[in-house]
Image (tube, grey):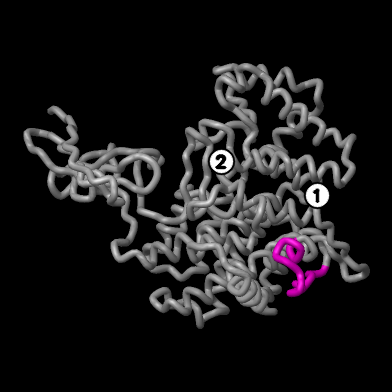
Amino acid sequence: MKLKAVCMDSSNSSNSTSSKIAHLVYNGKTVELPVLSGSEGPEVLNITNLYNELDVFTFDPGFTSTASCSSNITFIDGEKGRLLYRGYPIQDLAEYCDFLEVAYLLLYGELPNIQKKDMFIESISRHTLVHEQISNFYRGFRRDAHPMAIMVGVVGALSAFYHDSLDIHDEEQRKIASIRLIAKMPTMAAMAYKYSMGQPFIYPKNNLCYSSNLLRMMFAVPCEEYLINPVLVRAMDRILILHADHEQNASTSTVRLAGSSGANPFACIASGIAALWGPAHGGANEAVLNMLYEIGNVDRIPEFIKRAKDKNDNFRLMGFGHRVYKNYDPRATVLRHTCHEVLDELGIKNDPLLNLALELERIALQDEYFIEKKLYPNVDFYSGIIFKAMGIPTSMFTVLFAIARTVGWIAHWQEMISDPTQKIGRPRQLYCGKSEREFVSLQKR
C-alpha cells in the first residue's frame, strides 16, 4: 500500500481559509482534503471525511499534530515564544491590565472601556458569596485532604445549588453561570485553605479588587485587620493573567470534551480542575518546590545538573523548558521581574530554598547545555518561587492556577457551545487487542 499527499494551490490570501487542496492517495483511491488557514499558525488538513471515504483513521497520541477545534481566543507561537490573548501580546496585558480586564477580554473578545469594566466588576462582586450550606461540604473532608480534591468536589456541587443557570442553550443562563464561577472560585479556594489550617472562613469584601480579595480571604483572621500589600497584590494579579488561558491544553480540552456532551457548566469546570491537578500540567509549579526540597542545598546543585544532562537518568529539572515553547516562555519573562520584586519587597535574603532556586536560575541562564537545549526557566519555576515567598503552601499552588484558568475554560466552553459545527467528542483508536474468538464456558476453561 502506498500513501502520498500532494498539494494544489489556488489560495486567496485575503480569505481566512485558503482553497488549497491536498490529495491523499491510499490503496488506489484518491481523496481531496481541504487545507485550512487561520490568521496565525500552520495550515491544517481537514480530515473530517477521511474515514467515510477511505475507511482509515489517523493515529496521533497526545493530539500533538491534531487541531481539535477552531478558536478565536488564544494563539501560541512556540518557536518565537509568543502568546496572544485575542491578538494582544501577553506582556502588554500583564503590564497594563488587571485580571478582570483580561477576563473580560477572553470572554467577550475586546478589552472593556471604563463603563463596561465597572459593570463587569460589579457583576462579579455581586456573586462572590457561596451558598452558606456549601461550607458543610468542607467539613466533610479530612483536614489533610488535598485542596484540589476539595475543589473538584465543591465546584461540581455548585450545580446542585444554582438550578437557574444550568440550561446551556439559554445564553443568559450561560452568562450567569460564567459570572458565578469566576466570582466564587477565589472564595471556594480560600475556604479550602482555611479549612486545612483549622481557621475560620473569611467572607469576601466586595470593595476590594479580585486579587486583594483572594489574598485577604486566605490570610486574614477575624482578630486583627489584614493589611493589603500592593506589591503582592500586583504579583498575584500578574500570575492570574499569565495563567488565564493557554490554548488547547489538557484541561481546556477536557472542559471542551465534557461540554460537548451537554454537561452543565459547573460539571465542565470541575472536570477541568481534575485534569489540571496532574503534575505534568497544573501541578508543575508544585513539582518545582518538591524538586528544590529534594536537592536540599546549593552545594548539591552540580550533582543534580549532572543528572539532568545524563540521558540514562530519569531525573528531570522541573520548571525548565516547555512542551510548546521552543524559545523563552513569554510568561516567564514577565514573572521573572515580578519574582524579584516580591523577594525585594519581603526582604527575603537568607531563605535556603529561595537561594537555591535563584542559583538554579543563574545556572540555567548561563550554562551552554541549557542554552543549547533552550531549557529556560518557565512560568512554573517563577510562580512557585513567588508563592513560596508569599507563604502559600505547595498544596495550594494548583488551586490558584485553577482560579486563573477558570476564565479561559469558560471562554472556550462558551465558544464551543456557540459553534454550530460542534458535536460530541468521540476520538477513535488503533485497536491492538484480541480478534473475535469463540466463547468458552466456565466448566471448559
The amino acid on which the numbered mark 1 sits, given as a three-letter code, is: Met
Point out the residue furthest to the left here. Answer: 28
Q: Residue at x 69, y 56 (%)?
A: 237
Q: Helix or strand or loop: what does disc 1 sit on?
A: loop
Q: Where residue 252 sits: x, y (%)?
A: 48, 54
Which image quadrant is residue 333 in? Answer: top right
* Residues packed near mark 1 inside 10 Å, few (<14), some (14 to 19) or many (20 plus): some
Task: Indicate the quadrant containing the N terminus: top left, top right, bottom left or bottom right.
Answer: top left
Quadrant of the drawing holding the C terminus: top left
Q: Nearer the viewer, mark 1 or mark 2?
A: 1
**Is the magenta region chiefly helix, strand or loop?**
loop
User: Quick one: which residue is furthest to the bottom in this view?
Assistant: 164
Which residue is tagged 1?
A: 390
State how many labels appear.
2
Q: Is residue 180 above or below residue 7?
A: below
The answer to which quarter of the image holds residue 203 is bottom right
Q: Position of residue 11 (x, y in %)?
A: 22, 43
Q: Nearer the viewer, residue 413 or 313?
A: 413
Q: Which residue is mark 2?
A: 280
In magenta stretch: residue 353: no
- Residue 33 location, x and y as percent? 19, 44
Q: Earlier in the sequence, mark 1 or mark 2?
A: 2
Amino acid type at image mark 2: Ala
Query: Relative to 59, is 293 on the left or the right?
Result: right
Q: Residue at x 59, y 42 (%)?
A: 279
Q: Position of residue 141 (x, y in %)?
A: 69, 63
- Which residues make up the magenta segment? 200-214
Which class describes the residues within 10 Å of circle 2: few (<14), some (14-19), or many (20+)? few
Q: Is residue 318 visible?
A: no
Q: CA distance from mark 1 to mark 2?
A: 24 Å
